[in-house]
Image (cartoon, rainbow, N blue to C red):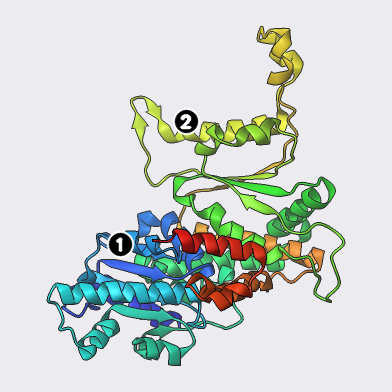
Amino acid sequence: MLDKIYAFAGKVRSGEWRGVTGKPIRTVINVGIGGSDLGPVMAYEALKPYVKEGLECRFISNIDPTDAAVKTADLDPETTLVIIASKTFTTLETLTNARCVRAWLLDGLVAAGAIEDTEEARRGAVAKHFVAVSTALDKVEEFGIDPVNAFGFWSWVGGRYSVDSAVGTSLAVAIGPKGFEDFLAGFRAVDEHFATAAPEQNVPLLMGMLNIWYVNFWKAHSHAVLPYAQYLHRFPAYLQQLTMESNGKSVRWDGSAVTTDTGEIFWGEPGTNGQHAFYQLIHQGTRLIPADFIAVANPAHPTRDGETDVHQLFLSNFFAQTAALAFGKTADEVRAEGTDEAIVPARVFPGDRPTTSIMADELSPKVLGELIALYEHITFVQGAVWGIDSFDQWGVELGKRLALQIAPAVSGDDEALATQDPSTQGLVTWYREHRR
């Protein structure tokens, strides 16, 4: 499958793969949701310096029609290729967006006179402008995509663990086969480390156990991830699904109820933006919030402001924040600065706030693979100790089923509305009365 993905990526990157009018591809749109979106978009953003010049990827996930409208607004259908990522090819949001994008592309080609407005011409255009990441080849073909252009992966792979499978096809196109191989090499390096390193030297094991220590013994409910690398701005959002969908469980493997807290609320923003937003709570608030700080020694864009190395100034904040969280500031130190006694208590920093500093030489494809695998294994360690299954996600299913049941009521079916609970009836009624 990797060979097939690499061959496809090579054709797109070289210009051999062309649209229905013979123009090379300039934009790749990945249509997916959850793991079929969060992983690829995070990795694409993180590795932008490695993306082929003249090629751009965009990602559509939200069923809110605004997402598809904004992402396609300035694109040329003749130079756009769409990757529909859906394991079963039945995901409501993905298939709805896929149909919207298909209509946009085909209507645009017809309006431009690029194809005739016939069913045959439209199907021919879909075959040139759409590929799939799925194992449901019958549904792929029904959509109009040639099954030859479908890239499969194992049915048991949860979306949040799938960016290094065919779900990463858009990334492979963007950074090329060699870049994607390096990406996978990063995963492999941490996989092997986790499998073979002694416990006292095993980084994912130690970090996973530390997280359990803070959750279960210090009652820490959330965990901040603070990348001091702008290209990692989507990494906290990626970890939200990886960790919270995996370990947000209250039932053990054997069906019994858990007797301890499980899971953590993962959140964060890049530094130094976060310093001017929520660091106050981490430093002086009443809640203990463990934080992971991530930085690289060599940025993709080293810059100077006169005599100042801006990246060195940037990382000075990284080092200062972790030091301040660890050691704080005593009342005597505050007084020594000449502070009025009345406000000394407000300027004391308690310290002893836990942080982990993760540093790499640069943000390369291999390093990104290492980072992702590190947190995958941390997540697994926590699930194993808590006795829960980190690889199912039944909690997301109920809302999906209810949405399908409520949809007729939203569309105007009074009988369907009458079957809903009073709260939902009131909300849907308000919406129907105000919808123009």
Name the foreground residue: 183 vs 242.
242
Is 354 displayed left or right of 321 in the figure?
right
Q: Position of residue 228 (x, y in %)?
A: 51, 42
| Residue positioned 42% across, 74% down in the render | 96
Residue position for label 2: 313
| Residue positioned 40% across, 79% down in the render | 5
Q: CA distance from mark 1 to mark 2?
A: 30 Å
| Residue positioned 48% across, 49% down in the render | 233
Give the quarter of the figure containing the C terminus: bottom left
Name the foreground residue: 265 vs 93.
93
Looking at the rendered structure, the secondary structure element under dot 1 is loop
Residue position for label 1: 52
The mark nearer the N terminus, 1 or 2, is 1
| Residue positioned 40% across, 84% down in the render | 150
Question: Do we see residue 108 in this rendering?
Answer: yes
Q: Position of residue 26 (x, y in %)?
A: 25, 66
Question: Do we see residue 404 in this rendering?
Answer: no
Is residue 200 depicted above or below 60 in this figure? above
Is 249 displayed left or right of 21 in the figure?
right
